[in-house]
Amino acid sequence: MSGHDLFMATEIAGLAGLRELVGTHLGYSDWLEITQERVNTFADATGDHQWIHIDPERAKDGPFGGTIAHGYLTLSLGPVLFPSIATVTGIKMGVNYGAGKVRFLSPVKVGSNLRLGAELTTLEDLPNNGAQVYMTFTFEIEGSEKPAAVAEIIFRYYA
């Protein structure tokens, strides 16, 4: 995280609080620097060792002028970044349920800063005092007009 982070997470009070926020942009996360170490660790975890991700020397002459993060690394940072936007209290359990449409729109160059913007778009009630919550996650690159990725993320919360 960088030194200019001024954001504080919003506390959402249970399922009722989620319902009240449908259609609301919840805010932005802190900025997170995308380091070569993080990219290399992700490559090791997934087995995706393509040179555009892990070989800085070769990537200098590649299409992006340096190494870039894996698209799925960017997407996987949602659970890392979202807690600095909001936390849901008064629930027994919350789980990542899946993703709808996911698009990787711009490469994330190693050394750049990334943040998450989140909008709560839809909530569907579930049996057993639960809710399925749809959010649009927009991963932004500092200094870029075009986002790195936009994804519909689905959570399930149970009170």
Image (cartoon, helix red, strand yellow):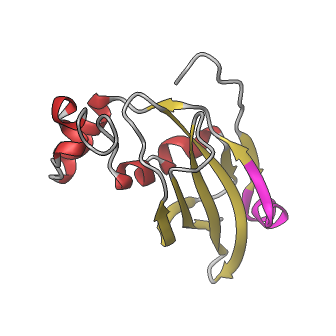
Residue drawn at x 17%, y 44% is 51
Left-right relation of 32 to 84? left
- Of the 4 image quadrants, the one containing the C terminus is bottom right
Left-right relation of 83 to 60? right
Q: Is residue 12 above or below residue 34?
A: below
Q: Is residue 72 above or below residue 83?
A: below
Residue drawn at x 48%, y 65% is 103
Give the quarter of the image for residue 67: top left
Left-right relation of 67 to 116? left
Q: Is residue 140 above or below residue 156?
A: above
The location of residue 54, given as percent across then percent down, is: 20, 38
Reply yes or no: does residue 106 show up in magenta: no
Left-right relation of 6 to 82? right
Residue drawn at x 49%, y 57% is 105
The location of residue 10, given as percent across then percent down, is: 75, 42
The location of residue 78, given as percent across then percent down, is: 50, 50
The location of residue 82, given as percent across then percent down, is: 58, 46
Give the quarter of the image for residue 16: bottom right
Q: Residues in magenta?
A: 14-26
The one nearer the camera, 132 or 126, is 132
Residue at the bottom extreme, as displayed: 127
* Total tally of numbered discs in the picture: 0
Q: Is residue 90 above or below residue 23?
A: above
Reply yes or no: does residue 16 show up in magenta: yes
The one nearer the camera, 34 or 157, is 34
The one nearer the camera, 88 or 80, is 80
Residue at the right extreme, as displayed: 20
